Image (cartoon, rainbow, N blue to C red):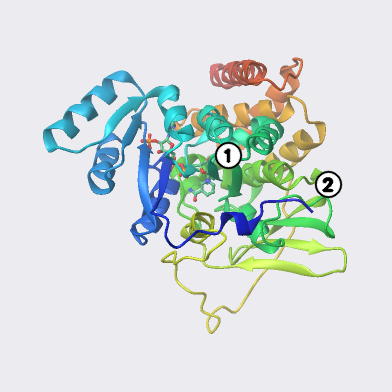
Amino acid sequence: MTGIDASDQRRHPDVGPERVTVLGSTGSIGDNTLDVIARHPARFQVFALSGKTRLDKLFEQCVRFRPGYAVTDDAASAAALSRRFRDLGVPTNVLHGSQGLSFVASHEHADVVVTGIVGAAGLLPTLAAVEGRRRVLVANKEPLVMMGAVIMERAARSGATIIPLDSEHNAIFQCLPDGSTDCTGGGVKRLLLTASGGPFRTLDASRLADVTPAEAVAHPNWSMGPKISVDSATLMNKGLELIEACVLFGMNSDDVGVVIHPQSTIHSMVEYVDGSVIAQMGAPDMRIPIAHGLGWPDRIDSGAASLDFGTMIHLDFEPPDEVRFPCLRLARDAARIGGIAPIVLNAANEVAVDAFLEGRLAFDQIPTIIESTLQRVDMPHESTLEGVLRVDNAAREAARELVTGRLAR
Ligand SMILES: NC(=O)c1ccc[n+]([C@@H]2O[C@H](COP(=O)([O-])OP(=O)(O)OC[C@H]3O[C@@H](n4cnc5c(N)ncnc54)[C@H](OP(=O)(O)O)[C@@H]3O)[C@@H](O)[C@H]2O)c1
């Protein structure tokens, strides 16, 4: 089994703080990352932060953590933020756009890069971090779905270290021998991703058409951004994670199982050929995988509560219902087909989820839009960035037309 050499990564006690770039710092992953960083001021220092719409929050984060760089979406917001820093004497340079994100993601002074941007917008900075040979803590799963093989191959070539932050993949990383990420040897039989089942786990299929965005983002166990919360409600999140697991751990999609576990106490499991199943448990708190990734191979305090085995009575498991939640089936099929299918799946899902969150599409139409887009878009697969972006654009256009067509009826 190959992987990252943990002894190479162990921190020498005399080195100064590690400098961390947090992409998407104004979001949920960003909040949790900064919370863990703040608990270890001698160990971590913030190098760069980024946000898109929540600029007051980005401003406050910069005032508190004093990073060298902040990155906004466009030139106007960058200039406005820069003025505010000057007035207050905050020594933060402001950049903007994907060039700015790629700059702070690949900068030689950024020892660690946390990818907390949502969706395909994180693709370019993820590639930049990998090509810049950084230690990359990956939460932003969509780039791995779009061009995971290329990202892993470029990481291997540059010598970048990739550590999964998604709780399921971080759990699997913890259940493998220290530093292993390649499951193609070493006696691993299959990976088992756990899923809470989301807020509609027990809802009758006939009622799924009427659920509201507010109900869909009210996840029973986790507090997350709106897109991933809707993905959890449709089970697309588990489908994207299935593809992510194949990429990160070199597994075949048929050897990655999904099991519904409503308590979200076991975050995922690895089954070995001898029948042993190793599970990682913990409170449903993203600071646990984030602290694991930031500290690895050391263990550092995350601030999360301990599990209370005195009151924890049940650990329940059930198979996923792919009839009520077809997104998981669509993702599994896309993983099997490969080529452009995962790119189209991801793009169509982003368009459909946006439309649902904006009240333009019913919840139960999300899988319909994705399936129709998969049927419509037929293009050659090129693994170059330009080729992937061409397919991504074509799929978004097709999905938007399908959403609009549905409204016109
Ligand atoms: N949240 C979790 O617990 C969790 C767990 C596992 C994996 N993940 C993955 O981590 C990623 C982030 O999820 P999240 O829940 O933290 O999302 P979120 O709360 O919505 O935060 C997204 C972040 O990305 C920024 N952003 C959005 N669109 C952007 C764009 N076009 N260009 C640049 N920045 C942009 C946002 O900026 P503004 O807010 O300023 O607009 C925000 O900082 C997703 O890929 C998700 O699947 C999240």
Residue 368 image label: none
Place residue 140 in its image quadrant.
Answer: top right
- Lateral position of residue 52 relative to residue 330, left or right: left
* Of the pair 398 and 59, the residue shown nearer to us: 59
| Left or right: residue 396 compared with residue 40 | right
Q: Which residue is mark 1?
A: 209
Q: Is residue 186 above or below residue 241?
A: below
| Residue that appears at 35% across and 62% down | 39
**Residue 70: horizontal and vertical position, in percent?**
32, 34
Side of 85 where 194 appears, left or right: right
Q: Earlier in the sequence, mark 1 or mark 2?
A: 1
Marks 1, 2: nearer the viewer:
2
User: Residue at coordinates 63% horizontally, 31% vertically from top-left?
Assistant: 346
Residue at the farthest left position: 87
Which of 333 and 273 lies nearest the eye of the viewer? Answer: 273
Residue type at tag 1: Ala
In the rendered image, residue 118, in percent from the top left (x then y), is placed at 49, 36
Q: Residue at x 45, y 44 (%)?
A: 225
**In the image, what residue type sits under mark 2?**
Asp
Q: On the image, numbered disc 2 is attached to which residue?
A: 254
- The x and y percentages for residue 332 are 76, 40
